[in-house]
Amino acid sequence: MSDKKLKVLAVDDDMINLKLLKTMLMKTPNVSQVVEAKNGADAIGVLKSQDDIDIILLDIIMPVMGGIEMLKVIRADES
């Protein structure tokens, strides 16, 4: 089993859910950092500026860009 600590991107438009998710994830021994984004468009910006994200947890229904649309953008980007 690897000792690698994970960097998680949490994406949700509900700030209460986002804070609860971050609190829970930071109590997990293999999570070192949780980066927050309030919608899919913000998350895409985070992914472009931080290439060391290991896991993305996202809400599917959000304003600006929802989770499904965000996944389509990520999959279309070859980098």
Image: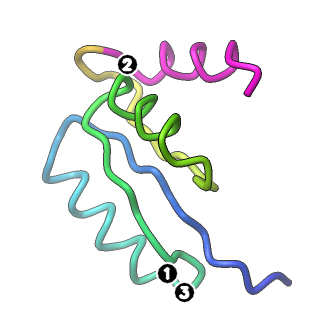
Residue stretch rendered in magenta on the structure: 65-79
Query: Going 41% across and 26% down the picture, which residue do you hit?
Result: 60
Foreground residue, 75 or 78?
A: 78
- For residue 54, side relative to residue 37 (left or right): right
In the image, which disc is placed on residue 66? 2
The picture quadrant where one finds residue 77 is: top right
The first of marks 1 and 2 along the sequence is: 1
Amino acid type at circle 3 is: Pro
Query: Going 48% across and 41% down the picture, which residue do you hit?
Result: 49
- For residue 70, side relative to residue 27 (left or right): right
Is 7 rendered above or below residue 46? below
Amino acid type at circle 2 is: Gly
To which residue does mark 3 refer?
A: 29
Q: Quadrant of the C terminus?
A: top right
Q: Position of residue 74 (x, y in %)?
A: 61, 23
Q: CA distance from mark 1 to mark 2?
A: 27 Å
Circle 2 — which element? loop
Instruction: Reply yes or no: does residue 45 show up in magenta.
Output: no
Foreground residue, 9 or 27?
A: 9
Query: Going 74% across and 86% down the picture, which residue do you hit?
Result: 3
Mark 1 in CB contact with mark 2 (< 8 angstroms): no
Q: CA distance from mark 2 to mark 3?
A: 29 Å
In the image, which disc is placed on residue 28? 1
Q: Position of residue 62 (x, y in %)?
A: 28, 23
Task: Using a 10 Å C-alpha cutoff, classify the residue at mark 3 as few (fewer than 14 neighbours), some (14 to 19) or many (20 or more).
Answer: few
Is 49 rendered above or below residue 22? above
Mark 1 in CB contact with mark 3 (< 8 angstroms): yes
Amino acid type at circle 1 is: Thr
Of all residues, the one furthest to the right in this rendering is 1
Query: Going 42% across and 71% down the picture, which residue do you hit?
Result: 25
In the image, which disc is placed on residue 36? none
